[in-house]
Image (cartoon, helix red, strand yellow):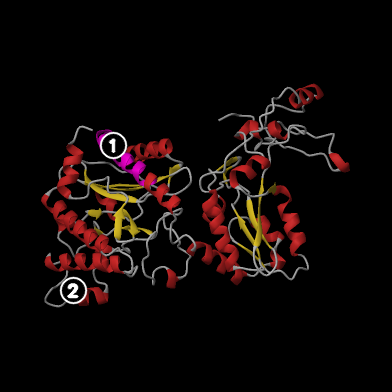
Amino acid sequence: MTEDRTPAVAENPEAEGGEEPQEFKGRKNGLYGEISDELAASMKTGWADTELHGLTPVPQAPYAAARRAALSAAYPGERLVVPAGNLRVRANDTDYAFRASSEYVHLTGDQTEDAVLVGEPTGEAGHDFALYLLPRSDRENGEFWLDGHGELWVGRRHSLTEQEQLLGLPARDVRKAAEELAGLTEGSAVPTRIVRGYDAGLEAALADALDADRDAELKEFLSGLRLVKDEWEIGELRAACDATVKGFTDVVRELGQAVATSERWIEGTFWRRARVEGNDVGYGTIAAAGPHATTLHWVRNDGDVRPGELLLLDAGVETHTLYTADVTRSLPIDGRFTDLQRKIYDAVYDAQEAGIAAVKPGARFRDFHEASQRVLAERLLAWGLLDASVYDVEKVLELGLQRRWTLHGTGHMLGLDVHDCAHSRREEHVDALLVPGMVLTVEPGLYFQQDDLTVPEEYRGIGVRIEDDILVTADGNENLSAGLPRRSEDVEAWMASPA
């Protein structure tokens, strides 16, 4: 990484209106000191005009506009503030890669750090929406090369005029947002709501006008707004699943390298595909070999990959527009299941089949979970892991006894977040009926811990999960990740194929 990100100090001697000169501070131990007048003058001139003209709106712009209209209708007469969020320090002067808030992305199609969407009420109904964004770096005062986040350091960003063309919204300088919004709210009778947790500076500036309960309700509403995907979103999720299929195929083709190294090779192989085909992985990849497969969120990925054991790979590509797949396969590392591995795998497959069959319009959200859990409870009884002389299936499910080995819920909503719509109201989500356009995962599993003395020794350390991304359609469902085999015999054939 480049050493001297910024010079020590540079002042703008031509600051307008008698304002204090702007300072851009560099590293304490940077190699450059003061900037000569000659260098400062040189950096102001000789640059071509790079403004882009005639831009067309981003594909999601009309869909984002429809979502804003729904938001406006829900909160007439109220000021609405939806921040994208800020950069977060990883260490010293390096930041984590920025990921805009899902609420902001869903309503705008933009992914810019520090940005804010503001809806100003236009009376009893309707809102004028505008974006506050960072403009191009200032070349006159040297910001573009002196500021650590200037464009010569981090890359060109769109001008406000360009953003207006791309996003279909008026754009203003975000550096004035806190002051302008504080001025609007001071002494105003207009209620103000903000999506909390993304921009502490804005929350502090508006603190006197905010109410925690109202703000929580806004977050809940925006989460629920994502429950039913529009056609554009479904297209993005298809693309995410298609890229994820390629990533799993990459991993299978490189399992020999993983055996020679570790689970990290698997993680890195899938990540390469995610970065080539999309923005990134949609969540931390779980590359769990052997007994690590019994740890639900194994993301250390530092263990050995041994022939004869299973690999549980839970991974998803996130598209450039931030929609993510979420797929899991449990694979025999040497290409063939043992008899016991196949027995456990086929039980999970049958449970997933029952769960997928239960996904259809008018079904309860809970139905796919209950269908899958019933199959697994039946197998646990048949195998003698639960005492059939004491319990029948109904009693096992009533008491939740199968959960010792099934552990988690059988699925969740999917979209911009891997666990999408998590803050929505229960009555429109987990206690609701499925409708076309919803996308959810179906992912039953069985996990036998290494130290579980209630199961035969040969079961211990085996973990199996199978997960697919399911779209609710008008007449049933569609498996968006069907490009990956699921039956045990199909998995073996796929792993044995040359390409």
Q: Residue at x 40, y 49 (%)?
A: 237
As shown in the figure, which amino acid type bears the numbered disc 2?
Answer: Val
Whether residue 244 is situated above or below residue 375 in the rendered picture: above
Q: Which residue is mark 1?
A: 258
Examine the rendering and report whether any part of residue 368 can be seen: yes
User: Between disc 2 and disc 1, whose residue precedes?
Assistant: 1
Q: Where in the figure is residue 2, as x and y percent of width and height?
A: 59, 29
- Figure check: 49 above or below 177: above
| Secondary-structure class at tag 1 | helix
Q: Position of residue 440 (x, y in %)?
A: 36, 58
The reply, left or right, for residue 101 in relation to residue 180 is: left
Identified at 31% across, 62% down, the residue is 410
Q: Main secondary structure of the magenta part?
A: helix
Q: Position of residue 55 (x, y in %)?
A: 60, 38
State the extent of the magenta-drawn residues as a range.
Answer: 240-262
Left or right: where 118 falls relative to 304 = right
Q: Nearer the viewer, residue 213 or 470?
A: 470
Front one among 411 and 478: 478
Quadrant of residue 400 in the image? Answer: bottom left
Residue 33 found in image quarter: top right
> Which residue in the protein does label 2 denote?
393
Q: Position of residue 220 (x, y in %)?
A: 52, 66
